[in-house]
Image: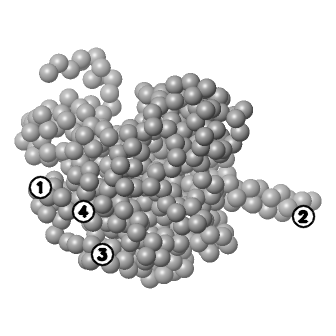
Amino acid sequence: MYWPGAFCAKLPHYLNIPAIISAAEIFNVDAIHPGYGFLAESAYFAEICDACNIKFIGPEARIIRLMGDKIEARRAMGEAGLPVLPGSKQAIESEEEGLKLAREIGFPVIVKASAGGGGRGMRIVRTEQELGHALETASTEAAAAFKDGSVYIERYIDQPRHIEIQVLGDEYGECIHLGERECSIQRRHQKLMEEAPSTVLTPEMRKTMGDAAVDACKKLGYSSAGTVEFLLDASGKFYFMEMNTRIQVEHPVTEMVTLADIVRNQIRIAEGEPLGQTQDDLLIVGHAIECRINAENPETFAPSPGVITAFNLPGGPGVRVDTFVYSGYRVSPFYDSMIAKVIVHARTRELAIARMKRALEAMVIEGIKTTIPLHLKIMDDPRFRAGDISTNFMEYFLSRNVRKNGAEAAARV
């Protein structure tokens, strides 16, 4: 196979497939775990691994490709029995086509990138006049981020909850779920905090959503770990949003409440082992919360690159920190701003919130700004503490804090 040398030289080492495969062959590697993103979502990389007799620790390339195209994923999951929001059956080719469909669906609608992820290439449209600009900007953003500018439209639900179901499937057709994660605390479609279990799901709702996700995965022939993501409206109806065919950033909250080792299960499944557990074995104990610590100004969300001059991690029972940084580490402005994840587990949600606050207050990161102060404020918010949250929570929270800060400033004057 021919690999253009100039192209390979420009790639960062973690995306340089020829270099990765060469290293794997030199060291007689049997399998490759692709991590959280990048190559974990590359059907091409999975195919290359297969062609080189190296086991890709993840689902088959056909599944990665299918779920990576959001339009095709909607179609496939709808055919597999999952409820899907009314929307496009194909990419929108013109403003006129988009306007016709949006009128049929009814406003508001949301424009999404077909190859999207991470909140990029998404625009909420509430009026006909906004649609043309939204289609153009979403397509431009998608083309820049994913090299694919195709977009589609679906009905937009106001103030939904973002609930995702963690699934595990083996190569023999067995599949189970490990309960749900609540991922509704997000800004511009980027998750900030996650927790498990959700404050709104009853055991009956958990079974209904979990069984639906498992049944769909069985019909697809899914193996490995994966996440089926849903939007849940105020009436309790849920709709398929997308499926992530990889390990999720927020997977530790599921591990905390189920004692499952999801990465270990991925490896076991790739080795050809059966799941070795049934749905009846699922046991959810206590409550877990994860805070994503970003190198950002907590008030403006502007990136905060620079050198970390002091770094100290919290510890103790029920506290876990996943990070790669250290004192003296230079945070680059060219990559994702997340530098750590703090995960806590406790017997109840109230105790988990208290434990997270103590952990964040003990965490020391100096030399740059981080979102730690933001997380502390969120956990003091009455609506958050009551579990009254949705994907619109941060709009409410930020506007409330602007009003509060303005009132305090006026009082000082």
Q: Which residue is mark 3?
A: 282
Q: Earlier in the sequence, mark 2 or mark 1?
A: 1
Q: What's the residue type where badge 4 is placed?
A: Cys
- Pinpoint residue 75: horizontal percent, then vertical percent: 39, 43
- Identify the element where label 4 is drawn: strand
Residue drawn at point x = 41 percent, y = 45 percent: 74
Q: Which residue is mark 2?
A: 411
Measure how far apart labels 2 and 3 are at the Cα level: 53 Å
Q: Is residue 370 left or right of residue 313?
A: right
Q: Earlier in the sequence, mark 2 or mark 3?
A: 3
Tell me the crowding category of disc 1: few under 14, some 14 to 19, or many 20 or more residues within 10 angstroms, Cα based: some
Q: Nearer the viewer, mark 4 or mark 1?
A: 4
Looking at the rendering, which quadrant does residue 304 occupy? top right
Residue 307 vs 356, above or below: the answer is: above
- Identify the element where label 2 is drawn: helix
Residue 49 vs 77, above or below: the answer is: above
Q: Earlier in the sequence, mark 4 or mark 1?
A: 4
Q: What's the residue type where badge 3 is placed?
A: Leu
Q: Nearer the viewer, mark 2 or mark 1?
A: 1
Measure how far apart labels 1 and 3 are at the Cα level: 23 Å
- Pinpoint residue 385: horizontal percent, then vertical percent: 61, 74
Residue 246 vs 254, above or below: the answer is: above
Q: Which residue is mark 1?
A: 271
Q: Which residue is mark 4?
A: 175
